[in-house]
Image (tube, helix red, strand yellow):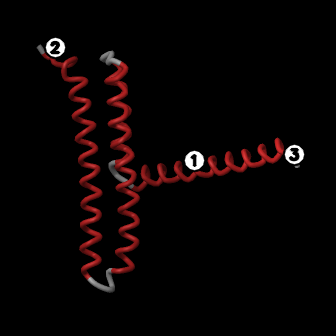
Amino acid sequence: MTHCGHLLSEYSIHIRKYVHSVGYALAGLGHAFVTERNFPVFVIAYAASLVFTYVFHPSPMEFIAVMMSGGFFLSIELLNTALERFADAFDTHTRKQDDVHHQAIKRTKDVAAAAALVAILAWVSTLTMVLWPRILPLLK
């Protein structure tokens, strides 16, 4: 095989791995949509926040701030879901052994939920800072 043929073969392998990775990520996203009661609501709220922000003609940086803070929250929510699933699986295994591990897992899940709370507060704060000056004149 020529050097160029070898590079193409390696490139093809990397693309296949990437495609598989995207497939796994989409499966995880689908799992969150189906199993997490609030996740579809969060995604709809995120999409609505982007449309609503766009309607009020934000600066590019303001729009990016809303987009990034909302995307950050959704990412943290997905990580929280993954951590909960892992903790639940581990807890089922260790619950029979002792209550110390069970309490540690509960605290872990609580901290993960707190991370999601901080992320949504950051998103709402960003939305408020961007939209409030535009909405306030309409209320008068």
> Which sits earlier in the primary sequence, circle 1 or circle 3?
3
> Closer to the N terminus: mark 2 or mark 3?
3
The amino acid beneath tag 2 is: Pro
Residue drawn at x 29%, y 63% is: 109
Along the line of sight, the residue nearer the viewer: 5 or 30: 5
Q: Nearer the viewer, mark 2 or mark 3?
A: 3
**Furthest residue to the left?**
140
Which mark is drawn over residue 2? Answer: 3
**What is the secondary structure assignment of the residue under circle 1?**
helix
Mark 1 or 2: the one toward you = 1
> Which of disc 2 and disc 1 is earlier in sequence?
1
Q: Amino acid at mark 1?
A: Val
Q: Residues within 10 Å of mark 3 (few under 14, many from 20)?
A: few
Residue at disc 2, secondary structure: helix
Foreground of the two, 100 or 96:
100
Residue at x 35% of width, y 55% of height: 80
Label at residue 30: none
Residue 49 shows up from this direction: no
Residues at circles 1 and 2 in contact by the CB criterion of under 8 Å = no
Which residue has dot 1 on it?
Answer: 22
User: Quick one: which residue is furthest to the bottom in this view?
Assistant: 97
- The amino acid on which the numbered mark 3 sits, given as a three-letter code, is Thr
Question: Mark 1 against mark 3, which lies toward the viewer?
Answer: 3
- Rounded to the nearest angstrom, the CA distance separating label 1 from label 3 is 30 Å
CA gap between label 1 and label 2 equals 44 Å
Q: Position of residue 28 (x, y in %)?
A: 49, 53
Where does label 2 land, which residue?
137
